Image (tube, grey):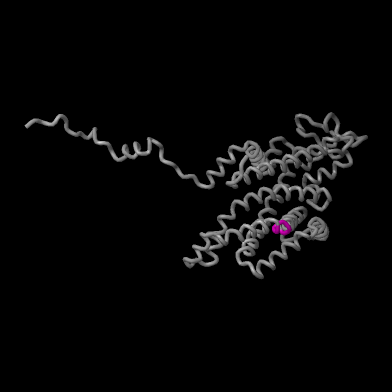
Amino acid sequence: MTAPLHEPTAEAAPSAAEEAAVATGGAKAVQGRSLGRIAWERLKRDKLALTGGVVVLLLVVVSLLAPVISGLLDQDPNEYHENLIDPLFGTPTGSLGGISGEHLLGVEPVNGRDIFARILYGARISLLVGFASAVVAVVLGTVLGILAGFFGGWVDSVISRVMDGLLAFPQLLFIIALVSVMPNDLLGLTGSSVRVFVMILVIGFFGWPYIGRVVRGQTLSLREREYVEAARSLGAGRLYILFKELLPNLVAPIVVYTTMMIPTNILTEAALSFLGVGVKPPTASWGQMLSSAIDYYESDPMYMVVPGVAIFITVLAFNLFGDGVRDALDPKASR
């Protein structure tokens, strides 16, 4: 009996992994991506949005570190430097509003306060009002909007009519009238803190109908989807459907609208301070600086340019970042 020409060995037997690789043509396994990762990859391709996001982050960090930065520069936002002011005209000595190595953006007319330090502290007021009032509006708008869209009927009618009334209400005039009669002491707050608190509440209260309408419209569409009907058929309660099925799918429009709402709130705060019903002096505010610069726009134009540019850059950065976030979270968007 002759031996076989060759015997099968372990090396000759292909493994299951090799067979799978041959069957798939050597292609790598497809990795799943979460919605957050997909949105981040889309956002990374938008250079303008990333630039806006970096500027926003820088503004937040600078405003939080305003006392540290002004301390390193040895500049107090309320310290007078009358020796840097021309006694005849009341304007800063030197060129470009007194810009120097010690005063990076010059000094204010008449009193000589450092503009850079006041810009830093003014950013704190603007961003605080912008973010805090947006949080108030988002919470109210999300809760009431999702209730109106989910329950419908008389609940939807009542909430919708309230939204219509608030949208038609003269917000700016109401804030001016309210702030002008507010006491100096309220809930343990004094001075400018009272006005900041009132501005946050009023701006947020009058801002919630805008996001409320968006959330209501999205909820009306989502409540008829198959997964919601499936949850109902399995015996899920209303609270479960609201918080587990609907709310996670509303995160994207809420985030997008929040990024669009913050710059609007910042402009509202600047307008109120410009009109004299914002924070009280000597608390720094960009709008208040613009109001004071009206009398010196010819003799010291830099005093008006600096806070104006600060407001412009801040609002532009938020808008660019908001546009990018909207496009990144919208799977149907194309750039």
For the point 65% across and 63% down, the residue is 144
Where does the magenta region start and end?
Answer: 205-209
Residue 90 horizontal/vertical position (percent)? 89, 37
Figure check: 178 above or below 320: below
User: Looking at the image, which residue sits at the far right?
Assistant: 88
Horizontally, residue 102 falls left or right of residue 5, namely right
Q: Could you tell me how many numbered marks the image carries?
A: 0
Comparing 28 with 146, the one in front is 28
Comparing 251 with 276, the one in front is 251
Residue 172: quadrant of the picture: bottom right
Comparing 300 with 229, the one in front is 229
For the point 83% across and 59% down, the residue is 177
Residue 6 horizontal/vertical position (percent)? 16, 30
The N terminus - image quarter? top left
Identify the main secondary structure in magenta.
helix
Figure check: 178 above or below 123: below
Comparing 158 with 27, the one in front is 27
Residue 3: quadrant of the picture: top left
Residue 82: quadrant of the picture: top right
Residue 266 horizontal/vertical position (percent)? 73, 48
Task: Decide whether residue 146 is among the magenta residues.
Answer: no
For the point 82% across and 37% down, the residue is 303
Horizontally, residue 219 falls left or right of residue 172, namely left
The C terminus - image quarter? top right
Q: Is residue 65 visible to us here? A: no
Residue 223 horizontal/vertical position (percent)? 57, 61
User: Looking at the image, which residue sits at the far front?
Assistant: 1
Q: Is residue 317 visible to us here? A: yes
